[in-house]
Amino acid sequence: MKKLVSIVGLFLLLCCAGFSLHAQTIQPREKTISDAVESISSANMYTLVEELVGFHNRNNLSNTTHPTQGIGAAGHFLFEKVSSYIPQSNGRLSVEKVDYTVGGANTRLDRDVHLQNIVATIKGYDATDNRVIALLAHYDNRNGQENDTIRYAPGANDDGSGVACLMEITRILSRIEVPITVKCMFLSGEEHGLYGAQHMAGLAEKEGWNLIAVLNNDMIGNSDASETHTQTNTVIRVFSENIPVVETEEMRKTRVYNSAENDSPSRQLARYVKEVGERYVDNMQVKLIYRNDRFGRGGDHTPFARKGFSAVRICEVNENYDRTHQYVREENGIKYGDEIWAIDFEYVRKNTGVNLASVLNMALAPDVPRNVKLDASGLTNYSEISWEAPSQGKQPDAYYVLIRETDQSQWQKKILVRDTRIKLPYSKDNYFFAVQSVDAEGHESLAVFAEGKR
Ligand SMILES: [Zn+2]
């Protein structure tokens, strides 16, 4: 009887194995990345948020010339803080104040304002590789009223938490040699209409940057939901657009032909953040949200997405509306306002780890394979996928072919391939495929969806 049970058990196991792509995954952590994630300091980030809050009010209409208060002083402080990491960077880190003018009559700003983005550039060492990764956070803020420049507006979480994350990443990356360029952008103008991000996305387009990924961190430190009091610091959301807003008629036809409405480049970036973030940060689940952003609210990744760049928003899973865009006060036992005491710095530390691991893995990986295609010409139960080596930078050691069933969100299987084509015994009708480049240490590039071609 016991033997029969075990035979039945084995049979069931084999049946399941035959019908499912699920397998135990091995996720070796590479030392450069795990050491970097290890070195993230929540104490540093606490101090940074404390200093930001000290500027009293960082409204876009606030004082730009006062030495210790207002958005001008805050921007100058960030510029100085980034500059303090230049000596340890071996000449790779530079920082600039990017000026722009926005507003005017009949806009939400009501008058012209001169604002600044603070941009930290950590230059890659490979001159033959022009890829750029951008991280975004906004340092402007607001209280209960959009144009109130007088009353206290701490903005500790929105978006002091994102600014602290980027500052810590700048500090750590300034000491690590990577082949491609990483830009940490401390943006203004967000609360009045994403102006700072619009300006930078415009520059990226005009100057023809090869911007492969944009990670916007806006509100990553609150772990306690208002009203429902759901609490978690083990889940972070990554928002990504389903169908690219810039989709052309030709892109639309390709998408429909491939049923690829869940495979936009921004969605591939979101999947990448999930895979790599969870690989390197313990006790952390990256939750993909199939939306560009939340209802009725925007974020700095959107101007980049509108220019056709792959861009996602990283945001806490529980929002607290008592603490967002509120005057600091107490009413009926509820504390309102975006103050530092409410921030969960262990959560900020883990979310910074998700960002840092994703950026470093991407920066250390070879460029993506080109002309990735699935042969859709014949009637066969095999799938033939082919691709070409990247056109620039270090060449891959191998490639990963990714497979998932059509009703699954995440890639389920990774096959290491040394060639630039593979014939697999899976029907092309029942699966989606993509290809990544990978180096000898296991750093993989973003995934390129394999489009069916007749
Ligand atoms: Zn914000």
Image: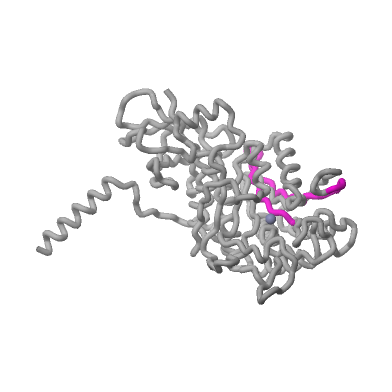
Taking the magenta stretch, the answer to whether it contains residue 113 is yes
User: How far across and down, in percent of the image, does residue 131 sit?
Assistant: 63, 40
Residue at the location (72% across, 58% down)?
88
User: How far across and down, in percent of the image, does residue 417 sit?
Assistant: 40, 39
**Bounds of the magenta segment:** 110-139
Q: Residue furthest front?
A: 332
Q: Using the image as rendered, state which of residue 205 and residue 340 is in the foreground.
A: 340
Occupied quadrant, residue 84: bottom right
User: How far across and down, in percent of the image, does residue 3 sit?
Assistant: 12, 61
Decide whether the magenta segment is chiefly helix, strand or loop. strand
Taking the magenta stretch, the answer to whether it contains residue 92 is no
Residue at the location (42% across, 42% down)?
402
Left or right of 389 in this view: 109:
right
Query: Split into 4 quadrants, where in the image is the C terminus?
Result: top left
Specify the quarter for ligand 1.
bottom right
Q: Using the image as rendered, state which of residue 356 and residue 102 is in the foreground.
A: 102
